[in-house]
Amino acid sequence: MRRITPTFFFAAMIAAAFFLIFCKEEGFHQRHWAFPLESQGSLTVDPNPASCASCHLQQFGSWKATLHSRAVGPGFLWQLPRIGKHGSENCMNCHSPNPETKTLLLSRLGWGEVSDSSWKSGSEENGVQCTSCHLRKGKVYGPFPKDRIFQNSNISHEGFIPRKEFEESEFCKNCHQSPGTSKQVNGKFLMDTYGQWRKSEFAKSNIHCQNCHMPDRRHEWKGISDPEMVRRGVQTSLQVLQKEEGAEIISELKNSGVGHLFPSYSVPKVYLEVWTESISGERRKISEKTLGWMLDLELQKEIFDTRLSPGESVLIRVNLSKEQFSKLKRVEFIVIVDPKEYYKRMFQDNWNYRDTFREDTKSWVLPNLKKALDEASSAKYELVRLEWKKTISE
């Protein structure tokens, strides 16, 4: 039998202390988001978000307007019959995490039966809902209260279990970061927002996802689809510098406040355009650039990657001759965001080949696909329009 020496015992104590100090928090995240989530079992609370609204009206109102609440939307639904039961269950880990809502959704596709009556039909349409983050095995979890004395005994649903991890970026990781064994394209994970954040100054400064996407704990989760949110994360400028040989137009966009690549995923694209208008009224685009990670429809090949790291800028420089500048009246720098560019391409391609779908799936697939295509096609918006006008002295 091996004898435990004092040195070995001391080393073991150090290792145990290291685990308790540095691995405890990670353990909570791993347990809380162990996919697939376990069944809640017998509930003493109504899992419907509308029921939570009786006490948490502000959070409910914010959530109702988010993409989280629409995670089980047409863009998700139309694909399920095509990827099958197993593939659908994997996607539902993030889009409809609770096993009870999974069962309801799978039953609609003819892939199972509903046995738990606590979760009413329609619950599956709520996407990522209150229970997805806050309920585990019938117990309610949440962050520590900020501005009032914590008296758990006075709170309904038998109180809740406060955890500081709700305000850490790791809480968002499981649904916004590809696992280490996942597919990569040109050495990059399809979802790498958490990894990008970890490498940034934001992580070093202890600025977490929640600080930007849930300010003051608002359940909004705004991102690339929200113009106001994006404007807060970038800086733009336009200059027209007159020179002896003519002039130079300099347009700039800087990732000044986004804690990860801008844009993060392969889905959105950001278009930078420089337009001029002549004295005669002729308007034309003289330069353009695209920011984003462009992949083919099969997500197998990288076409280009022009995303900006935190603090990085992109410049568009255009030189004009004296003659060109003399005819110039106005310059515009326009930034356009297409938050669903990849989806639009992919949905359109599938719609073009809709006649090849299985007949027994068309009644489910086609209406959802058409609606998803319409939504993606209407998502583009103008973020910024800067203008320079020539003065009389110029």
Image (spheres, rainbow, N blue to C red):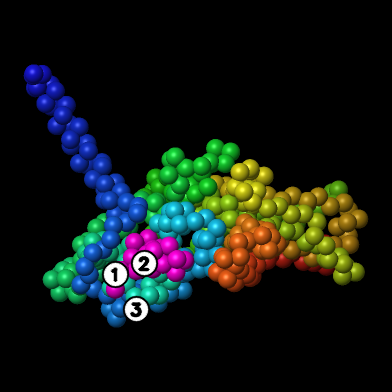
x then y, percent, for residue 298: 62, 48
Q: What amino acid does circle 2 point to?
A: Glu
Answer above or below: position of 138 versus 299: below
x then y, percent, for residue 149: 18, 69
Q: What amino acid does circle 3 point to?
A: Ala
Q: Nearer the viewer, residue 321 or 289?
A: 289
The residues bearing labels 2 and 1 have C-alpha atoms spaced at a distance of 10 Å
Task: Of the two numbered discs 3 and 2 on the same chain, state the one appearing first in sequence.
Answer: 3
Q: Nearer the viewer, residue 259 or 18?
A: 18
| Magenta-colored span | 96-117
Mark in the foreground, 3 or 2: 2
Question: Label 1's element?
Answer: loop
Image-quadrant location for residue 363? bottom right
In screen coordinates, is 188 left or right of 297? left
Pointer 2 residue: 113
State whether residue 194 appears in this view.
yes
Q: Nearer the viewer, residue 225 or 39?
A: 39
